Image (cartoon, rainbow, N blue to C red):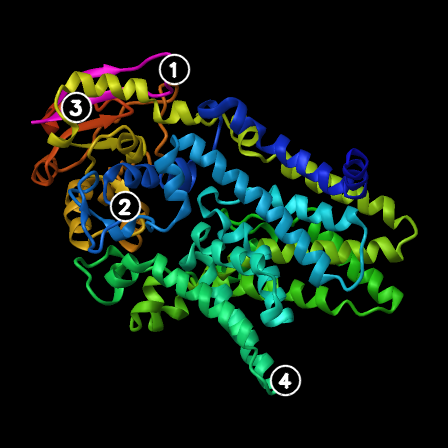
Amino acid sequence: MGSRLFNSIIKHKFIWIACLVLIAYLLPYYILGVDTHIRVHDNLDSNIVWYKMLAESGQIFTLTDTMLPNAINGLPRSTLPSPFDAVVWLYVIFEPMTAYTISQTIMRFVAFFGLYLLLTRYVFKEKQSEWITVGAALAFAMLPYWPSGALSIAGTPLALYLFLTIRKNGWKTKAYIWIGLMLIPFLSNFVLSFVFFLALLGLLWLIDWIRFKKPNWPFFTAIASMTSIYVVKNYLLITSMFFDSGFTSHREELDLGHNTIQRSYELAWENFLYGHTHDAAHQAYIIIPVILLALLVAVYSKIKPRILMTLFFCNLAISFWYAFWYWEGWRIIKDNVMVANTFNFARIHFFDPAIWYICFALALVILWRYLKFGKILVAMLVVSQCIGLFGLSEELKYKEFDSPTFAEYYSEDLFQEIEDYIGEDQSEYRVVSIGMHPTIAQFNGFYTLDTYNNSFPLEYKHKFREVIAGELEKSPGLASYFDTWGGRLYMYVAEHGKDYMFTKDRNEPIENLDINTLALEKLGGDYIFSAVRIENNEELGLQHEHTFENNMSPWEIWLYSVS
């Protein structure tokens, strides 16, 4: 028994080494816990709080689009994650940081094994060096994915492997393949990426039918089954959009996409080289040069790397589609077709990372086979890419940026002091934040009039705008940002711009805040949590109540009451 285990470890030593590297990559979450540095943008400032709010709401399952009172005097339930989202239940069962850690662990290992299986079973027709297959899969697993995406991006290689297996084996496909395929929707987002993924698979099924004059019903069943699961999972979103919408979403007034053709062209190349903040593949400095070198070697060696060239130019085409979706020339369609304005068709760019790492593996094979010192070069390239990505782990990256830890960001002890000082039940009053993200207050149980969400009532956005109209008039850039998108319903300050992280080490006072306190009162506003002092508070009718800080928190909170 021991001998067989030892032989198995030796046989698959590269996989075991990769798993150990992934464990080391994830170790800070398990050792440091809430003292881990993690991403703020679209993470600490939003999704983590949404999951926590929903987990504590008592409204996880509901047939109608009820309103949650914690934000904007009634945030529609349909704007928060589905009750069939597995990550929601991690936040129900565990503390937020523990849930986050488990989600990260699942995402990393699924990304690794998914790409490894796809490469070894379908991309390469014959066995390749594990330096290449394991190395490319390991690098893919360590990418700085958008954390709350779970398997939306990281899980696409595994999903493709499972679908191709069913396409190949038909009804003889093993049960665990079907089960794995049916589980992916519960850990991924349909609107974000899988709507495009399933559409492309549907097109592949249709092409197969035309080519082989026979429909592949098992493959069709797999596509239809996953789509059906997504429909059921997102029942609240679908019913609110198409059947029984109790509110008009602020997305109806989205006015994105006014880039000139020159700016669109520049953005296309920026995305091609550096990717998007949510799907950065870090391809510019190693992967793209390796691909170009491999293509030169292929020309010299008189081989035709069709798959590599196809995928490489596919990513180029995706980058141009992404960039030109925001081109002003689309406005005539977006202004007249609602779905073109409210749904982001540019999100197909979330396929970029998987395509880049398949290309990376294909290019490495060419160098391995056709260069004199190819094996040494490939090993160096794989190690270099993996080391670079390991250094981008959240703890290492955001500690270097001096970003707050999970515990520091939410500063529960400090906000407990504020709650105790006010002395009322949190549901009895409403607050807004200045110089800091409103979800910090939400995380600590306060009911906020400001928020950051994907959708909310348009009518409320108009009312909230009255509060900050004076500051928006000072800054055309902020006014355009709020009016054309507006997902962040923040107490904008012109001199702060889009900076919402004013810690006690950088908290210059606001000299002349121009907000409409009467409009704030009409919304029900009682208190302002400001990360900086407001010099003209008395002119605005704001009473400075107290200033809160402690050694464990990066914030200094000036509490103002709205009189």
Q: Residue at x 44, y 31 (%)?
A: 98
Residue 559 part of the magenta-drawn span: yes
Mark closest to the chain's N terminus, 1 or 2: 2
Q: Residues within 10 Å of mark 2 (few under 14, many from 20)?
A: some
Q: Quadrant of residue 318?
A: bottom right
Q: Is residue 112 left or right of residue 152?
A: right
What residue sits right under mark 4 in the picture? 212
Q: In this view of the protein, can residue 177 be seen by the observer? A: yes
Disc nearest the viewer among 4 and 1:
4
Disc nearest the viewer among 2 and 3:
2
**Residue placed furthest toward the bottom:** 213
Mark closest to the chain's N terminus, 2 or 4: 2
Q: What type is the residue that disc 3 sits on?
A: Tyr
* Spatial separation of the CA atoms under disc 4 and disc 1: 66 Å
Instruction: Decide: is 376 above or below 247.
Output: above
Q: Residue at x 55, y 31 (%)?
A: 397
Q: Residues within 10 Å of mark 3 (few under 14, many from 20)?
A: many
Residue 176 placed where, x, y %?
57, 56
Whether label 2 touches label 3, CB < 8 Å: no
Q: Secondary structure at mark 3?
A: strand
Q: In this view of the protein, can residue 258 be seen by the observer? A: no
Disc nearest the viewer among 4 and 3:
4
Mark closest to the chain's N terminus, 2 or 3: 2
Residue 14 part of the magenta-drawn span: no
* Spatial separation of the CA atoms under disc 2 and disc 4: 46 Å
